[in-house]
Image (cartoon, rainbow, N blue to C red):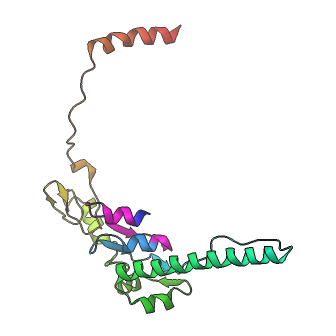
Amino acid sequence: MIINVMETIETPVHTTALGKCHSSAAVILAAGEPGSRAVHQNARVMIHGVRATGSINTTINSNADLVASADRIQHELDEMKHTAKAWVEMLARLTGQDEAKLTEDLKRDKFLTAAEAVDYGLADLVRAPNPREKKRAREGDGGVFGNGGRRLGGRAESDGNDVIDLTKVKSEAPPPAEPSPSIAASRPKRAAARKK
């Protein structure tokens, strides 16, 4: 599960919701690094409870078939209850919501605006584009980062509304290595062979 990996690795995972962030995507959003879970202002977030994924389609010809079908149905129902309980516990841990409230909210699709997602605990901040900062970056007033962001220890500090002027970014890649003499000598031979 993606969330298990996110919680296992040491590197903080920053999450951002754009457009529609429904179902498992909303839980992945909530599992991001606390303080770094963002929702863009026009995004819609939706959470819901566990749903049945398969269907039990059985032809019943005898009492034995009926008992076997009832057992299969009960087994799938028990598994759904277990999964639903784990889902609610995880969302409660990630959002800070009460399990009883979550259980009630997850009975049907719960759609949230960006601000509502923050209030609910699925995210920490709403990102809104700032046209003035983008204009300043185009005019060359914002440095490499449109919002005047600064580099700390080789890492960019940003508020997420960056416009990066790539003409001001210096490449840190080393120059390309010269080919070895044997490779350089074989190039004309290969070119001549292709012409034949």
The part of the image, by quadrant, that contains residue 63 is bottom right
Q: What is the span of residues highlighted in magenta in the rendered image? A: 4-25
Residue at x 50% of width, y 12% of height? 194
Q: Is residue 159 left or right of residue 66?
A: left
Residue at x 75% of width, y 77% of height? 67
Q: Is residue 58 left or right of residue 93?
A: right
Out of 11 and 124, give the one closest to the viewer.
11
Can residue 189 be seen at all in this image of the molecule? yes
Looking at the picture, does residue 167 appear above or below residue 112?
Answer: above
Q: Is residue 128 left or right of residue 158?
A: right
Does the magenta segment cover residue 21?
A: yes
* Outermost front residue: 64
Callout count: 0
Can residue 19 be seen at all in this image of the molecule? no
Looking at the picture, does residue 184 appear above or below residue 98?
Answer: above
Q: Position of residue 22 (x, y in %)?
A: 50, 74
Q: Position of residue 59 (x, y in %)?
A: 83, 71
Does the magenta segment cover residue 16?
A: yes
Q: Position of residue 96 (x, y in %)?
A: 34, 85
